[in-house]
Image (tube, rainbow, N blue to C red):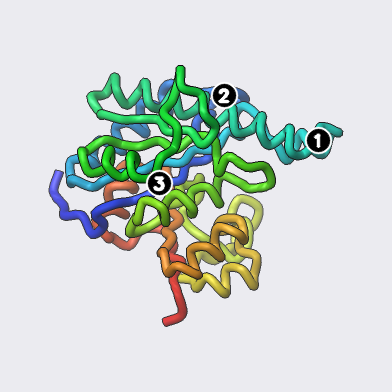
């Protein structure tokens, strides 16, 4: 493959639902293998990669809280689901020859390193993919917010939000055939119009620190590499021009 990276260090945000594939629950090994191949193609560009993954394919804290489980308890259960996904992703990466580490914001030394910012950066500099598990380690925060937080902590150049659609639309493209996709949108507009780029806390963090967000379709082969190379893929969320 040809190409030159535009970004030296990226934070990739994956939803837990992305791991479902054709399943209704759990993890599809074919999806794990696909993600590993996509990440390997970006590693070939000498790009340093951090990953945050959700847990919605196993457990959704917000949903369960609406059914009577204490919100904080439900969120902690959701954080544990992200650790399960992270371990699965790590194992697949290692099987594909990609050196990786899992760091968890909830300490569980038997299965993951504790999150230590300096150690994470050192892993990245040594060419390892770092998978950040456990969300922020606190209830009431989503993995979107965790992704923005970790991206800033590791000094990533860009936050990549992988989705099932091609970018950010003015309305749900799965429900509206006339939905219009934005090539570029500002943080302020995304928040004001509730465009659901990421949750409001995550977008606000990125706005305050001028961290660009790129929303793109994970399911199209080569998209992560194309985004890393600066090609026009998906929607860029940036500051006012």
Residue 70 marker = 1
Between disc 2 and disc 3, whose residue precedes? 3
| Image quadrant where residue 82 sits | top right
Q: Name the foreground residue: 161 vs 51.
A: 51
Q: Residue at x 28, y 60 (%)?
A: 231
Residue 228 placement (x, y as % from top left):
28, 53
Please tell me how crowded label 2 is: few (under 14), some (14-19), or many (20+) other residues with Cα within 10 Å.
Answer: few
Q: Is residue 131 above or below residue 160?
A: above
Q: Residue at x 55, y 40 (%)?
A: 135
Residue 144 is left or right of residue 218, and the answer is right
Quadrant containing the C terminus is: bottom left
Please tell me how crowded label 3 is: few (under 14), some (14-19), or many (20+) other residues with Cα within 10 Å.
Answer: many
Label 1 – label 2 distance at C-alpha: 28 Å
Q: Is residue 208 above or below residue 130?
A: below
The residue identified by callout 3 is 12
Residue 153 marker = none
Q: Residue at x 44, y 37 (%)?
A: 115
The residue identified by callout 2 is 23
């Amino acid at each position: 493959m040809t190409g030159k990276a535009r970004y030296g260090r990226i934070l990739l945000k994956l939803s837990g639902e992305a791991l479902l594939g054709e399943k209704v629950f759990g993890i599809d090994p074919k999806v794990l293998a696909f993600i590993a191949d996509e990440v390997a193609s970006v590693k070939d560009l000498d790009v340093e990669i951090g990953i945050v993954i959700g847990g919605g394919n196993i457990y959704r804290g917000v949903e369960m809280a609406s059914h009577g489980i204490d919100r904080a308890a439900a969120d902690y259960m959701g954080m544990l689901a992200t650790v399960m996904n992270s371990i699965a992703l790590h194992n697949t990466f290692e099987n594909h020859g990609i050196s990786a580490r899992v760091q968890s914001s909830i300490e569980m030394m038997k299965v993951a390193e504790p999150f230590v910012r300096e150690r994470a950066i050192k892993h990245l500099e040594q060419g390892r993919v770092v998978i950040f598990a456990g969300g922020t380690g606190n209830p009431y925060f989503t993995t979107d917010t965790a992704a923005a937080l970790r991206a800033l902590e590791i000094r990533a150049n860009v936050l990549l939000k992988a989705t099932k659609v091609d970018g950010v639309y003015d309305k749900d493209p799965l429900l509206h055939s006339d939905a219009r996709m934005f090539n570029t949108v500002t943080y302020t507009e995304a928040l004001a119009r509730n465009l659901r780029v990421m949750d409001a806390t995550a977008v606000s963090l990125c706005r305050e620190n001028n961290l660009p967000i790129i929303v793109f379709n994970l399911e199209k082969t080569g998209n992560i590499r194309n985004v890393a190379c600066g090609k026009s893929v998906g929607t860029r969320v940036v500051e006012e021009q």
